[in-house]
Each structure stands twice: as C-alpha cells, then as structure tokens.
Image (cartoon, rainbow, N blue to C red):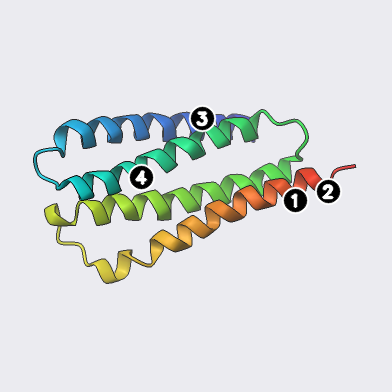
Amino acid sequence: MEKKIILTALLLGTIAIILGAFGAHGLKKVLTVDQLNTFEVGVRYQIYHALFLLFLANSSILTLKEKGVIFYLVIIGITLFSGSIYVLATLALTTIKTKLIGPLTPIGGLLLIVSWMYMFYCVFAKK
C-alpha cells in the first residue's frame, strides 16, 4: 500500500507542476486573471495533497487499512475538487455544462477535509 500511495503522490505532484506551468504560460493569454487564479487554486490543493500522501505513506502510526481509507478519500477528493476547478476555470475554452461540474467542487473539498479529520482521529485514538 505504501508504494501505491508514494507512486500516486509522485504522479499527482508531477501533474500539478505540469498544470501549474501550463496555467502560467499556456493559459495566460486566453484566460482572465480571475480564471487563472481559480486554476491556480486547483493546482495548489493538488500539490498540498500530493505532499499529504507522501506523509501518509511514510507514517508508521497508521494501519494499512487506515492508510487505504485516507488514500481513497484524498484521491476522490482531489479528483472532484481540483478536477472541477480546472474545468470551471477553463470554461471559456470548452463546451462543458457547469450545472454538472459546479457541485463537484464542494463535495471534493469535503472529502479532503474528511481525510485530514480521519487521520487526526486515527492518530488521536492510538494508545
């Protein structure tokens, strides 16, 4: 499980860096400042959670089952949160309907919060 978490964290980090560079250079000419700032929020939270996953993988206080729960909460959360932000920020370039995408952002954010809270609970409950 630790190897899977580390590899996923490294992949998420790599993708975030690529998207950050793409946003700063490739999208700068076609998006507004507000849209670029929104896009950057998605990148920032993706990086934060890639680092969180690296920490999770190297934590010896948690069981494999606890790591698995946190891992899937983060993966689904970052996909919904950052993924929906990327889509919403680039709507001017796509034909995606926002009614389907908009509600995914807070759901993803909630899953990210739950992942941190669950990790807190798991550590706190250890004797």
**21 relative to 56 in the view: left or right:** left
Secondary structure, mark 3, is helix
Under circle 2, the secondary element is helix
- Image quarter in which the N terminus is found: top right
The residues bearing labels 2 and 1 have C-alpha atoms spaced at a distance of 6 Å
In terms of depth relative to the viewer, which is nearer, 109 or 8? 109
Q: Nearer the viewer, residue 11 or 115?
A: 115
Mark 3 touches mark 4? (CB < 8 Å) = no
Residue lying at 14% horizontally and 38% vertically, measured from the top left: 28
In the structure shown, which secondary structural element does the residue marked by tag 1 occupy?
A: helix
Q: Characterize the local packing of mark 4: few (<14), some (14-19) or many (20 or more) Cα atoms within 10 angstroms.
A: some
Depth order, front residue of 15/47: 47
**Which residue, given by chain and number where applicable, does mark 4 sit on?**
41
Give the distance between the C-alpha atoms of the residues marked 2 and 3, in whole angstroms. 28 Å
Type of the residue with mark 1: Tyr
Image check: 88 left or right of 3?
Answer: left
Report the disc number at residue 125. Answer: 2
Discs 2, 1 touching: Cβ within 8 Å: yes
Q: Which residue type carries mark 2?
A: Ala
Q: Is residue 103 above or below residue 87?
A: below
Residue at 57% of width from left, 36% of height from top?
53
Q: Quick check: 101 above or below 51?
A: below
CB atoms at circles 1 and 3 under 8 Å apart?
Answer: no
Q: CA distance from mark 3 to mark 4?
A: 23 Å
Amino acid type, callout 3: Leu
- Dots 4, 1 in contact, CB < 8 A: no
